[in-house]
Each structure stands twice: as structure tokens, then as C-alpha cells.
Amino acid sequence: MTTPDTQRPRPGSDILRTALRRNVGAMAGGTVLMGLYQAGETAFPIALGLIVEHTLRDRNLGSLGLSVAALAVIITTVSLSWRFGMRVLQKANTTEAHRWRVRVAACGLQPVGRDLDLKSGEVLTIATEDADQTADIIEVVPLLVSSLVAVVVAAVALGLADIRLGLLVIVGTVAILSVLGVMSRRIGSSTREQQARVARAGAKVADLITGLRPLHGFGGNHAAFRSYRRVSAEARSQAITVARVNGVYAGTALALNAVLAAAVTLTAGRLAFEGRITIGELVMAVGLAQFIMEPLKLFSEMPKYVMMARASAERMALVLSAPPVTTPGTGRPAAGGDLEIDCVRYGSLRELKFRVPAGEFVAVTAYRPRAAADLASILAGNTPPHAYEGVVRLGGREIADLSIEAVRAHMLVNPYDGEIFAGTLRSNIDPSGTSGSVPEAVEASMLTDVVALHREGLDHAVRDRGANLSGGQRQRLSLARALAADTDVLVLHDPTTAVDAVTEQLIARNIAKLRRGRTTVVLTSSPALLDAADRVLVLDDGAVTAEDSHRNLLATDEAYCRAVAR
């Protein structure tokens, strides 16, 4: 018996470090270009101050022309560095987000499921919004460094005019960042909660869309909508809280930046009035006080974005660090298709024991539907071997010792609610495009009428989740896919519950004919499928209580007759 993998958890900080390490080159180039942009922006008021200084002092047209040319160079540098710097950073950001989306999606597509307490809608949110916000760190760091460049250039330029002006900028910047750093922690915790609630709302929507038809059928749609409204209201309330916190943060940052700019301007004015700095230096100081607000604003917003990226990375870590539910073996089953259930106890199953020899068509009918669902879960590998007692053998070998790929290639378990994907009828029946028995599978599943309805035939478009198909058509399409796989062992769970009795009778005969000589197990209470089987196993209270042909059981077992006769 195998045990779950105990891999080292992958925290959000590791994800952020990985993202930064993979994009060092792009970030270095982007940082240089954005640093040039910020330096050019900051150099603009410095150049204006120098122009005023030389114009008042020298009154030389040549010096003025040279100064204007210098301004043109600065403007060109600012324009080009911003354009190409943001292009480099946004490309790296988009690429990194794509990488993490693929990683999260790959976790869901692994043959072995992950021990993860998240719904598919929540995983979808993590694979989209959280992946994008995590990748934003690629832009945040270069912008943070370039903003720091602007602040340092401004502080040095002001310090050369008067040391008090330079110190004022440095001390003010440190104070602003200290205040905002404390506030950003609140943003991080609020954002994590908001993302979780939005993900739960997304999962609820996915569930509602999937079950909309049956909900309408028994009038449960209004209660379901009220349930979604409650979850959505919680997400909205948290979003308002996050917006309020962000608003306070932005307002505080703007106010502090304005106070610092005003302090620099007033201090420079007083120094000019006292004759400690020149008129040109005053113009430079006033210009820098105005220009510095933009990099200060950007600089002060960075802690918020860092916390948001970290919160998203932590949510991605929930998926990426989740251990597999089991560690499969490496063996392969023997050819043929022998299937044995040996004293299995799990859920509603109690010492379940039976054997299906290779090539036999066996139907299993459970008086309690839960027992059939538990058996299907074990055979499908959704329940790991360590979670139940007893042994399942496939081809004479314990399923716990086999690789999951070998099990899936040898045995296919088709659930009663098989997913239908956006594409065509053909791509749903034969996703890999390698099956040589698609026509036979279409005929056996009685999907021929659906194909004949449309001019495109098997190339008829199918919407996501089969939204343009009826329940019976979706079920037959899923059955056709299972039959086209042509595996040694095929397990079908209630494959005909959504079709009429006549079609069900034809499907039962077709399955028996198409699968002749290969092992087939059908979990069902359908009289047509039970009659088509070589042997029927009766499950009562989680164990096999009777086995015989369908007709013999009808004649000798009154409980069986009451359970399956329609």
C-alpha cells in the first residue's frame, strides 16, 4: 500500500522569488530604461533652473540655444525610455503570468489528483486573476528602483543647492514609506480575503450553470439563486472594504507627497529670500518639488502592489504545494482484463468481494446508489488505495502497485456525469484523434440521430459543457467517448439514465455486441442493461448478496424484482 507524497510546501515567497529569478534579464533592461525615464523627468526641472541661471547671468544666445538642445535630448530620452522600458516589462509580465497559469492548470490535469480543498471555480480564479497579480511583481520591482533613482537624483540636486533641501527630501521619503508600509499590510490581508470570497462566488456560479436544468426541473432555481446572491454579497462587501482601504492608502500617500512637495517649495523660497540659494536654484527646487510628486506617488504605491502580489502568490501556493492524494506505483497490469475486488471497505461498502474474469460482461446493481458511487470512485482512482481497506486487483496485480497511466490505459471508468467540452462531436468522442472505432462507438451509443440532425455531422460544434445538447444527447456523447477508447476494461456508471426506454434497450444490446470478448462492468439499475449482461451482482448493505442472470433473479428474488422492475 502506498502513502501520500509528502513534498515540501511551496510558500508564496518561493513563487515570487522564482518569478523574479526567471526574469532577471528583462527586469535589468527594464530597470535601466525606466531609470533613464525617471532620471530624465527629474533632470527636466534641473535643466530649467540652469537655463534661468545662465540666462540671467550670461545673457548669451549660444548658451540659451545649447540649453534648449539639452532639453530636447532630455525629452527624447524620456519618451523613448518609457516606451521601450514598459514594452520590455509588460512582455515579461505577460509571459510570466502565462507560465503560472499553465502551472496551475497542469496541477488540475495531473493523472493523480491533489489533496486540495478548493472547488474548480476557485482554482480557475487562482489560475487567472492570482496568476496575473503575482506576475505584476515583474513590473513592480523595476518601477520601484526607477522611482528610487528619481528621488535620489532630486535629493542630490537639491543637496548641491543647499544640504537642507536634500536632507528634507530623504527624510520625508523615509517617513512616507514607513507610514505606507504599515498601511500596506492591511491591504494584503484584505486582498487575500477578497480573492477567496470572489473565488467562492465563481465556484458557486460554475455549480449553478452546471445544474441549471435540473434546478429548473424541481423548482430549486430560486433557492440556488438566493444562495449565490448571499455569496456574491459577501464578495461585494469585502471588495468594498478593500476599495475603502485602497482609497485611504491612496489618499494618505497623495497627502504626504503633497506635504513633502510643499515643504521643499517653502523651504527653497525661504532660502532664496535669505539669499542662500540663487533664483535659478529656486526655479529648480520648485520644479523638482512638482516633478518629484509623480515618482514619490509611484514609489509609495509599490508596497501595496507587493502585498497584493504576495497575497496572490500565497493563494497559488495552495494549489502548487498541495500533495498528491497518493503516490502510485510503477508496474503495469497483465493483458486481458481480469478485475478483482477483494474485501473492500469504504463509505457504504462492507467487505465487498467479487471477481470479473477477462472478457465477461457483468452488471452490478446496488440497492443504495451511494454504494455504486463509492465503487466507481475507487475504480476510477478518485479514492486513493490508502483511503480504503481491502485490495483491488487489475490484471492480477494490486492497483496500488500500478502506475496511474497504466491503469487509465488499461481500464476506463466513465462517470454518469461525464464532462462535455467545447469543440465538436468528433473532438468529444475522440479527443486524441487516434481512435479507430469512432463510427462503431457512435452507432452503439445511438448517437447517430444527433449526427444526422446536422449538416456538419461529427464536425457539428458543441458548446462548453454541451449547452446546446439535451441531457440525453450529452449522456450518449459521453458513452460514445468511453466506447471509442476501446480499453481492456470498461466500467460504466449509469450510462442510460437520461434516455428513453426504447433507446436504452438498443444501447444495452449494442454495448454487449461491441464489447464482446472484453471486460465490461456496468453499475446500473436499468433492466435493459441488466438483461444484456452475462451476470448480475446484487449489492445490498455494501456487499454482494446475490449473483445470477437478470431473468433468474427476477424469478427467484422478490427484493431484486421490486428494485429493478419498471
Image: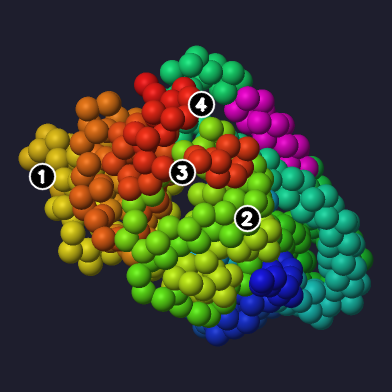
Residue 344, disc: 2
Above or below, 151 against 440 in this view is below
Q: Report the residue at 80% width, 55% height from top.
A: 184
Residue 284 sits in quarter: bottom right
Determine which residue is flagged by label 4.
Answer: 559
Secondary element under disc 2, as helix, strand or loop, is: strand
Residue 148 in the figure: left or right of residue 174: left
- Using the image as rendered, state which of residue 438 and residue 270 is in the foreground: 438
Q: CA distance from mark 3 to mark 2?
A: 18 Å
Please report whichever mark, 3 or 1, sits nearer to the chain's N-terminal start. Answer: 1
Residue 479 in the figure: left or right of residue 90: left
Residue 501 in view, yes or no: yes
The kind of residue on which mark 3 rests is Glu
Secondary element under disc 1, as helix, strand or loop, is: loop
Q: Are marks 4 and 1 in contact (CB under 8 Å)?
A: no
Pick the quarter of the image with the N terminus: bottom right
Determine which residue is flagged by label 3.
Answer: 547
Q: CA distance from mark 1 to mark 2?
A: 47 Å
Please report whichever mark, 4 or 2, sits nearer to the chain's N-terminal start. Answer: 2
Residue 109 in view, yes or no: no
The kind of residue on which mark 1 rests is Glu
Residue 456, disc: 1
Q: Within the magenta stretch, is there residue 246? A: yes
| Image x and y of residue 504, in percent | 27, 33
Q: CA distance from mark 4 to mark 2?
A: 24 Å
| Image x and y of residue 258, in percent | 79, 52
